[in-house]
Structure formats: C-alpha cells, structure tokens
Image (cartoon, rainbow, N blue to C red):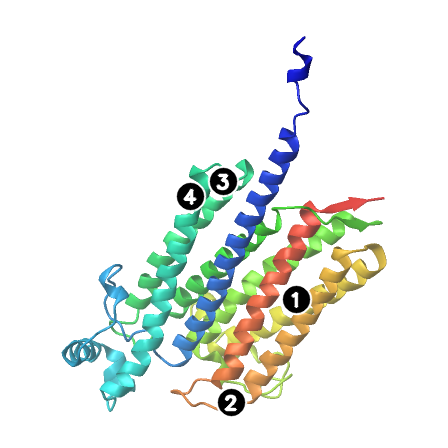
Amino acid sequence: MEDWLHFPQPVPAIRHHATAANARAVRNWLWLVAGLVFLMVIVGGATRLTESGLSIVQWKPVTGVLPPLSQQEWQEAFEAYKQIPQYRELFPDMDVAGFKYIYAWEWAHRLLGRLIGVVFAVPLIWFWATGRLPRSAKPKLVGILALGALQGGVGWWMVASGLVNRIEVAQERLAIHLLLAALIFSACLWVAGGLGPRAVSLVHEGAGRLKAVALTILAFVFLQIFVGGLVAGLRAGLVNNTWPLMDGAFIPPADVLWRLEPFWTNLVDNPVTVQFFHRMIAYLIFALALGHLLDAWMNAEGRARRGAAILFGHVLMQIALGVATLVLVEPPFAGAPHLSLALAHQAIGMAVLAVATLQARRLVQDVITN
C-alpha cells in the first residue's frame, strides 16, 4: 500500500553535484592564493633590486598595515631608517622623496603578505566549518597554513639581519625566505590540481621512470630557486657577466671557486661559486627536461606528453632570460641588474616551478598504463 510513497531518490546525483561544486570552489580558491603568492614573489624581487627591503625597520603586524599618513610620520619613519648602516653607507644623500619610493616597495610587499594570510585563513575556516573540504585535503591545507605562518617569521628574521652591522639582509636568509614562498606556491598548485575531475594520461611504458624524472626536475627547480636567492643576496649576477664562459673558462679555477675558508662557506658567501652552481643547475634541469620530453613523446599520450613539452619550453625560456639578465648589465638601482629583465627572469622561474609541479603531480596521481 505504501509503495506510492517511495519516489526515485536523486540523492547520489545531488551529492555528486555538490561534491564537484565544492571541489571546484576549493580549487579556484587555491589558484587565487597561488596567484597572490606569485605576485608577492615578483614584488619581493623588485624590493630586493631597488634596495627597499630595509626601509621599514620595525615589524608591526597590525598597525603596520597603514603607511605614514602625515609629513611628521614620514619624517619619523625616515629618521628611523637613518639609524641603520644601509642609509649611512649606501644612501647618505637620500631625501624624504627617495625614502618614500623605497618604503612603498617594502610596504606593498608586507601588505601582500598580510593579504595572502587573510585570503588563505578565512576561506579555509569557512570551507572547513561548512564541510566543503575533502578529508584528504585537510592536513595538506593545515600544512600550507603553517608554512605561511613560518614565512612571516622568516621574513622578519631576514630583515633583522640587515639592521645591524650590515648594509643588506643576509643572503642565506633571503634564499630561505624565497624557498618558503616557492614551497607555499607549489603546495597550493599541487593540492588544487588534485581536486575536481581527473584527466588521466596514458603511458605505454616507463611510467615509473617518467614519474621519477618529473619529481627529480621539481626537486632541482626548488634547489635552483634557493641558489637564485643566494645570487640575488650576493649580487652575484654582477660578476662574470659573460656566457657560456666565466672569465674565459667554463669552470673557474679552484683557487677562485674555493678561495674562502672553510671551503663550504664558498657555497653561500662566494659570488663566483654561487653563480657557477646557478649555471650548472640550470644546465642539469635543461638536460633532464629535454630527456623527459623525449621520453614522454615516445611513451605517453595526453597531458603527460603536453606537460613535458610545456615544461621544456619554460625551462628554455628561463635559461634565455637568465643569460640576457647576466650579459645585459644595466644597473639603474644601486648596482642591480636591469630591473625588467631580472623580474622577468624571476617570474618565469616561478612559472617553471608551476609547470614542474603540475607535471609531477599529474604523473604521480593521474596516469594509467597499458
């Protein structure tokens, strides 16, 4: 008698639609966060190139959101800057107008950091509280949040290194700061790429090899970003401005590469050594990306093959920009390389990281074999 009460139940379809919509919303949010991190890295690069990173000598997480608003506040901020070695040794003739210029870069960099924190934390809480987060994504997102909190502390740790007894921040701290930004950027892309419908790639043979090489390329891209931070911190791009040789040799003499004692300090303190390893890692990434492309072209179809081609194209473009930045030295800001070229080199470096991340994630999670 009660059979007429049992209507067809569309609940599974509704749940599937809701799950897909939730995944799409979370994915778009993570893409947005990654875009903001990308922008922050570029602004950070400009901050370094314009020698602006030490213009704000205090860390005020809340009140620092607002820049000086009156002439008196600007003068007070300028007087605080005058107390550090950078002003006395690099910019003793700077006036308030020049100070406002460098202050604007550092203020924008810190404001972006605060904005990224809000854009990540607030939606994370909302997605979590409303049950829209896939269970597997929760620990990953908490990990990204922890990296973001750590990044704020590392940023001030980096700035503090340049306020006493130095005219610039410590290059190893700058490199760590950049590496953390790269990890956050890559992690957002990795998690976002795993949400939503999967577009599987067919691999005929060598799936394990393709995955291993893709992960190896990603690891070396992270290493290269760290070494690139050292290059920026040491201004190592201003020495040996020839290519492919360095002072007439492909490998500089040992007494040049290892002139500092103890020898390991050359890896972070010797501009020639740091630039040399930056070049060598670039060549290694090029070789791996080319081999990966050939392997994928012969043994894979779909996105795995296209991703390998896109990755190789980005690596090739990045090397070309790196060479141009090196040899076309036009120092408009306190001996920095040409601003537009250097920032383009940094931007394409982050793009290489993006495509390397997505290619590795694709080969780890979205491959079928026959």
Residue at point 69%, 69% (across, down): 286
Name which residue type carries label 3. Answer: Lys
Q: Is residue 36 above or below residue 209?
A: below
Q: Are marks 3 and 2 in contact (CB under 8 Å)?
A: no
**Which of the two discs, 3 and 2, sits closer to the camera?**
3
Q: Are marks 2 and 1 in contact (CB under 8 Å)?
A: no
Residue at point 57%, 70% (across, down): 349
Does dot 3 land on a helix, a strand or a loop?
Answer: helix
The residue that label 2 is drawn on is 329
Q: Nearer the viewer, residue 247 or 126?
A: 126
Does dot 1 land on a helix, a strand or a loop?
Answer: helix
Label 3 crowd bin: few (<14), some (14–19), many (20+), radius 10 Å: few
* Mark 3 vs 4, N-terminal side: 4
For residue 126, the mark is 4
Name which residue type carries label 1. Answer: Ile
The residue that label 3 is drawn on is 138
* Mark 4 vs 1, N-terminal side: 4
* Mark 2 vs 1, N-terminal side: 1
The quadrant of the image that shows the N terminus is top right
* Mark 4 vs 2, N-terminal side: 4
For residue 30, the mark is none
Q: Nearer the viewer, residue 32 or 50?
A: 32
Does dot 2 land on a helix, a strand or a loop?
Answer: loop
Label 1 crowd bin: few (<14), some (14–19), many (20+), radius 10 Å: many
The quadrant of the image that shows the C terminus is top right
